[in-house]
Amino acid sequence: MRDHIVFYVNGVRRAVDIDAAQQTLSEFLRSSQHPHSERLTGTKIACAEGDCGACTVLVGKPTADGKAIAYQSVDACIAFVFQMDGRHVVSVEGLRASGGLSALQTAMVDGHGSQCGFCTPGFVMALHGLAEEAGTLPTSLDDEEVRIGLSGNLCRCTGYLQILQAATSLRPDAIASMSQLFDESQMLSDFAKLGGEAVVMESSDGKVVAVPRSLSDLIRFRTEMSSARLVAGATDLGVQRNHGLFEPVEVISTCEIPELQTIAVDGDELVVGAAATWQEFDEFICDRLPEYHQILLRFGSPQVRHMGTLAGNLANASPIADSIPFHFVTETVIEVESTRGPRRIPIADFYKGYKQIDLAADEVITRVRTPLPPPDVAVKLYKMSKRRDMDISTVTAAFWLQLDGETVADARVAVGGVGPVVLRLSQAEQSLAGGQFTLDSLQAAGAIARSEVTPISDVRGSAGYRLQLVENLFAKCYYDLSASLSVAVS
Amino acid sequence: MSQVGTPVPHESAEGHVTGTAAYIDDLPRRERELYVGFVGSPVAAGQLAAIDIKDAAAVDGICCVLTHRDLGGPNHFGPIISDEPFLVADEMAYLGQPVVVVAGGTPDAVAAACRRVKLEYEERQPVLEIDDAVRREEFIGPRRHMTSIGAEDDAAFEAVFTRAKHTVSGRFHCQGQEQFYFETQAALAELGEAGEVRVISSTQNTTETQQVVAEALGVGMHQVVCVCPRMGGAFGGKETQSALTAVMVAMVAKRTGRPARLVLPRGVDMAITGKRHQYRANYRIAFDDAGRIAAAELAFYSNGGAYADLSTSVLERTMLHADNAYHIPLMRVTGQVCRTNLPPNTAFRGFGGPQGMSVIENGIEMIAETLGRDAMEVRRANLYQDGNPDRSVTHYGQIVRDHVLEEIFDQLAESSHYHQRRAEIEQFNRTSPTHARGLAMSPVKFGISFTTKFLNQANALVNVYTDGTVQVSTGGTEMGQGLNTKLQQVVADEFGLPLGSVQMMSTSTEKSNNTSPTAASAGTDLNGAAAVEACRKIKHRMRAFAATLLADRDKGLVASPEHICIAGGMVYDDRDCDPDAKISFGEFCNLARRERIDLGARGFFATPGVDYNRETGRGNPFYYYTTGAAVAEVAVDRLTGELVFDRADLLMDVGKMINPGVDRGQVIGGFMQGVGWVTNEDLRYDNEGRLLSTGPTTYKIPNITDLPREFNVDFIANPMHVKNIRQSKAVGEPPLMLALCVWLAARNAVSYVAQGQPFEMAIPATGEELLMTMSQLGKPATKLSAASGNGAASPSKAGAPAKTP
């Protein structure tokens, strides 16, 4: 076992102990770690809640074959340093390795892509992240790719258009890649030597950070450290930490377990490992569950999807979590494990109350098992939020309708944001099942649904608005499905 | 080659993209520097009885705990009315209002000490809403009036409404808006060896910061220097409200002798600083069959928050823009700032103008709906007409001249294919059960100058060095708007130098004294003119010297300053055909110094001819107007209220652009900020006066995906505009108000759902506002009152349109 973590910052090796490991990555970068080190203040903090992207850096991780490093954009303000073990972090200062301005930086300068400049390093790094993902594409990124790719970066000055135009003016193959800027072979051999060893760091005052690298280690640590907090992508815990609601005193990272990173189809079920990120999940389901993919594009930002996980989203148990309604209507099963053995929990039983889940102190979520909708089932997902992208939902909904010609053979409907937990609307489902698929029947079910939910008024919307949304989404589902069904028929 | 007119990059752009452009929190930590925090009022309204700081002061690592008793002077400040305490002494007037300042060696120690401060107080019921304040007559400043010539007589004015073929009336609501500058309020203070305080502040207003800090410390202004290298955005939010942060760090530095820094966390910044004012307005408008407006009566009420700040001035600009770009023959405008228990509201790009224009623009939409006409045609018919004396005079008596409003309308209608798209939208709306599309074109006419006369002044310091390079300092502050870039271009042109020879220096009260805030879109107008004045003084001396230096009896050239050219990096006599007789600018400067020629100068500029009489409501407050128009198309989901903004076409007259790249950025950025205000930016408070939307997670400024798919931005030439620096026009604020067309397009979409039913809609048009408005339309029982003469005006005091005495 190792008692420190090792990572690289802009090509420079850093081995740090628990005090640094419990900082956020942005705190680490912006502070002077030893008397002669440079403060890397190019990484800016504007919100400290992973919403604005001013703190965007690239985090590189060795690929499965260990021969290259793959980089993704990450919000440094909500990432913890202990999540960086075996990673190469590139901040905006790292681009100096290109010997001047990178092609992207030059495009931003010439295209008036900056005004006050505070958000600009974040945009530059997010764009470099897009270029890394695009690889050696000989055509420039299109408008849509850049919009989605920058949906995690806010700017108050420019109105974005000049940034968009600068970004779409370049071909990714004209932009220096991180592998060109840094000698990765040395890092890769260093990371290989660190190998599959678990990291456990302890401080004299009782703080512990554990980074297990096998499921058996994870379960053992979980048993031994019953008060520790499990941390997956930290995309919510990082926010809570900055708001003073969470201190990473005792934590176990769940994201370095190879067995839990897999995503596969097993029979007619989708099986997702607890450590798989949203990005990995999205790539896998993109064609298999296009409706889910459409919601995912608006769910968090690229930076958040690069860190966050499905298991984390389910365990976080927010009633407006965007993923949960789909898993309710598909009757997903959550697999957990402890030294006492495995357990399978139907998702409807998993939630006990507001942010309360059926998970014992010694258990960890291992996999999420989701029955794929059969071909005769139409699925519609809705995420209603104040702003279309990168916003917490006001109301979420999932419709699962088994259609036999014009008849609804079976219906499942789940909604979030209208009560302490996500709900199946059993009365509305009953009114739909066995009836005709018509606007009238959907509207009637919507009126019933209205009486099944008890929303509150909060910062995102009034109770009255939420009730109206729940009711109207049934009609919307009718129009959306009849449009896509008629397209399928023709 | 002229630098002016070219889109050179922002002078800090390389610093921005590399992350080396430093903001307050990025500056190196000073030796023995202290962290500063503060304890704010836990209630929005109350009476403070006692402050116990004993436990807080005892926390390990704490250096000082300061209260109002530690101030060196009187405990009040304010840019117009000095009514705001630095630190609460008795009355607690808004949640989070600073009471106790704490400084220590670590952030943890400061946080621990803040938790140990004990406040004893008696809580009161806060006043949060405008209507509540009106009922209780909680006002700031007097009620203001503006009455156009001919509208003075009550009976005659009333008769216009009685005789009018049509009227609309009602009550219009618009919500406030958070500036959401990326760099939060921040300041760093340190002492010089004579005990003078140097404050590095993220502020639009170095002079006021200097003055307020001096007052708080009880020292002369000469004992305080305020420096602002740059801001990470400001938008008006750092015109006055940067002062409190600066005062807190200055108090700590003065008390301890140690450097002290405070950078507000986002949530604190949003919770305790002022925003764009929320407004309520009662309106009634009389018009004919063509939609031509005969008379309008408008009564504005703004939510000023707890103290005056800039509210009276903001309200004045609201009233001065109640006409927007329309000639309204008879107008009565009144305005009243209401006092509530919210943080004092303040400047935000547009400065009351957006709220003023929104009411008449909503009214025109209602006129069009009443008449079944296209709102664009109604707008076109009501525009000010250049050169037509009957349609050129505003309600405050200023003549709107040298403008191209009608040309803008006609050109934009054509380039945006307005009529064709209107037909397509009508067709779409007849058939779609799920969506309603809307289209709107709206103009902007924004008055340029501070409406407070004395603020229309600036000074600049230009120093030329013996190698021919130049440093420029002005009182203008750089917040991203490109002021320094434009000044650099203007000064480079004055001396015929490349941009690289001109360096813009940090704004400092040491170099520029008694300056105005960088605000009112006038930063380049004022500071640019002052810098040019300084350059010309130096050039005058240079020419006199060069004339003698280059005079050549053999060539028959007598000394003649009029023939000296300073251009292309050279100094020469334009009568001399010998190219070798030219002297490089650098060499010339060196020679000039040796002949004891002064190569530094201070320039001063005061805008000519502007004045406004607040008592009579008449005058010429504006040097000129910046104008433009925009077309927006939106789709509204009839089932969810979700708004999709599909296309924007913008056309503006901003004169001859000093930097087309910067100006284009200002137009796009200002417009999108306005789009945020009218769509998704939704400030929500609880019943105790606590802001709930205190971060980007809950307060949604526009995202890149909110950009319309098609976004055309263009400029129109206006040869009649020949005044102002290099014949340019101010561009900072005007485009924000173009965004009203997005809201109007949303209203237009809803009007197709309403099918003739009258309705009211507020700003912002959130999904909730749109869905609930459409849901109301579906229910005849709760149908809104008809758009007839007495309409929806509430019977309360706030509701009755006020009569001009």
Image (spheres, coloured by chain):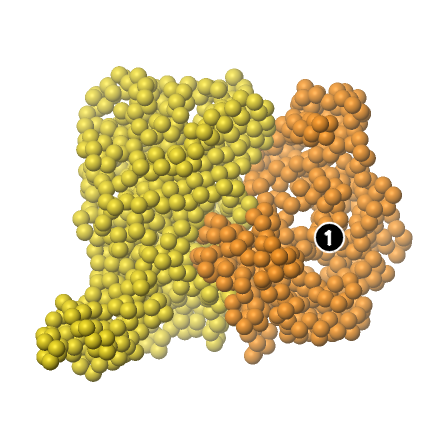
Chain colours: A orange, B yellow
Residue positioned 37% across, 39% down in the render: B629
Task: Establish if B748 lies above or below A346.
Answer: above
Q: Which x, y percent locates residue B535? A: 23, 66
Residue positioned 25% across, 68% down in the render: B567
Looking at the rendered structure, the number of numbered marks drawn on it comes to 1
Q: Chain of mark 1?
A: A
Q: Which x, y percent locates residue B605? A: 22, 58
Task: Establish if A247 lies above or below B798.
Answer: below
Quick one: quadrant of the N terminus of chain B?
Answer: bottom left
Q: Quadrant of residue A122?
A: bottom right
Q: Is residue B652 left or right of residue B704?
A: left
Q: Is residue A421 visible?
A: no
Q: Is residue B796 left or right of residue A322?
A: left
- Residue type at tag 1: Glu
Q: Which x, y percent locates residue B626? A: 30, 44
- Which residue position is annotated with label 1? A280
Q: Residues within 10 Å of mark 1 (few under 14, many from 20)?
A: some
Callout 1 secondary element: helix
Q: Judge by depth and name the residue closer to the eye, B662 or B179.
A: B662
Task: Establish if B248 lies above or below B542.
Answer: above
Q: Is residue A334 left or right of residue A386?
A: right
Q: Judge by depth and name the residue closer to the eye, B617 or A43.
A: A43
Q: Judge by depth and name the residue closer to the eye, B174 or B36.
A: B174
